Amino acid sequence: MDVNGTPYRSIWLAEDGRQVEIIDQTRLPHEFSVVQLSSLDAAATAIRDMLVRGAPLIGATAAYGFCLGLHEGTDNHALEKIAQTLVDCRPTAVNLRWAVERMLRLLTPIAESLRVEKAYEAAAAICEEDVLTNAAIGQHGAALIKAILDKKEKKEPVNILTHCNAGWLATVDWGTALETIFRAHQDGVPVHVWVDETRPRNQGAHLTAWELVSAGIDHHLIVDNAGGHLMQHGQVDLCIVGTDRTAASGDVCNKIGTYLKALAAFDNQIPFYVALPGSTIDWQVTDGVGGIPIEERSQEEVLLVQGLHGDKVEGVHIAPKTTPALNPAFDVTPARLVTGLITERGVCAASSEGLLSLYPEKR
């Protein structure tokens, strides 16, 4: 995606060919800041403190984190330490574990002298695969959006509600849920996006809105609890969200509040789609509600709201000083509430058979 006319990805190799650069997403939309990662600890901190976020980007950062860790040691003990450090960063997004296991499978059997070079090649490959995957997701999703436009008598804009950020900032480039909208827009389909603020970290307000502004797409920011009202009044044509982990049953885990949007969509007979790369499917979990670990983050994210105060990005307290907060970062939407899953291989039913129809090698 272009930022002020300059094309960027969300992660890339620095000019020295060793270090890695990322966009610090905690500073957006008020400040565009590039951070250089020079060590395993720096990569782990970027993941844990959400300088990078979104399942695909977390996986790509973990892959490059592996590369950085190998500069501190290349023996088998070092591999195990690197892997554990990265996996411990965040528990819910399965791409983190997927990327770490992929790196381990590649590096463990080869000579230590080759591990650094091969690790960088593998990390670059993961990034390139993500870009191609997301482009394919966009094509399949855009076709769904166009089909809704074709049913409209007056060809008014297709109103899409999304939750959290599943755009290029959540991936290496293009995005998942938002890429379907970007692609439809590029294809000439008139679209309008209802952007959930997505408390407590406000990824919708901070990131999704910023991306839509950059892409020139019509949108409005809404509070998280407004979606049901808009659906009741016919102002939403479909919902499209991303997911951090999808169970083999079709259950999807996404940012907290997604489940409530799916319930409202189901009650109002509005299509509810989830866009995801195959790497986000956890084939070992068949019950999303009981089997997907839900990350609980710091209560400070709930008790403080971040914004621009003067020329500084600051946090502001919104509750009594003695009030505690609970902060589950994700929830699980049962497959029965999901109209379909948009993947790089096509669109399928949110069910085990639906997923296996696209990924028969997993039978």
Image (spheres, rainbow, N blue to C red):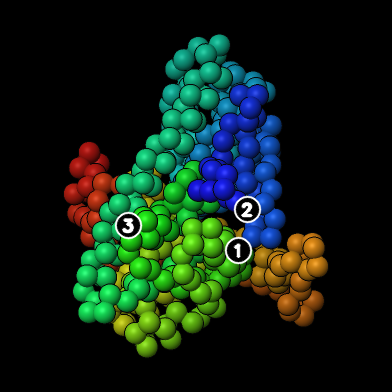
Going by the image, does 94 lie left or right of 272?
A: right
Residue assigned mark 3: 187
Kindly identify the residue that appears in the image at 18 percent across and 49 percent down.
Answer: 357
Quadrant of the image occupied by residue 84: top right
Q: Which mark is residue 81?
A: none
Q: Residue furthest bottom?
A: 233
Going by the image, does 102 lie left or right of 117?
A: left
Kindly identify the residue that appears in the image at 43 percent across and 86 percent down.
Answer: 229
Kindly identify the residue that appears in the image at 34 percent across and 85 percent down.
Answer: 234
Residue neighbourhood size for the residue with mark 2, other residues' Cα within 10 Å, grouped as few (<14), some (14–19), many (≥20) = many
Residue nearer the viewer, 98 or 55 = 55
Q: Earlier in the sequence, mark 1 or mark 2?
A: 2
Q: Is residue 53 visible?
A: yes
Q: Position of residue 329 (x, y in %)?
A: 55, 63
Amino acid type of disc 3? Answer: Asp
Q: Position of residue 243 (x, y in %)?
A: 42, 57
Residue assigned mark 1: 206
Residue assigned mark 2: 25
Residue nearer the viewer, 139 or 61 = 139
Q: Is residue 289 visible?
A: no
Residue nearer the viewer, 149 or 344 = 149
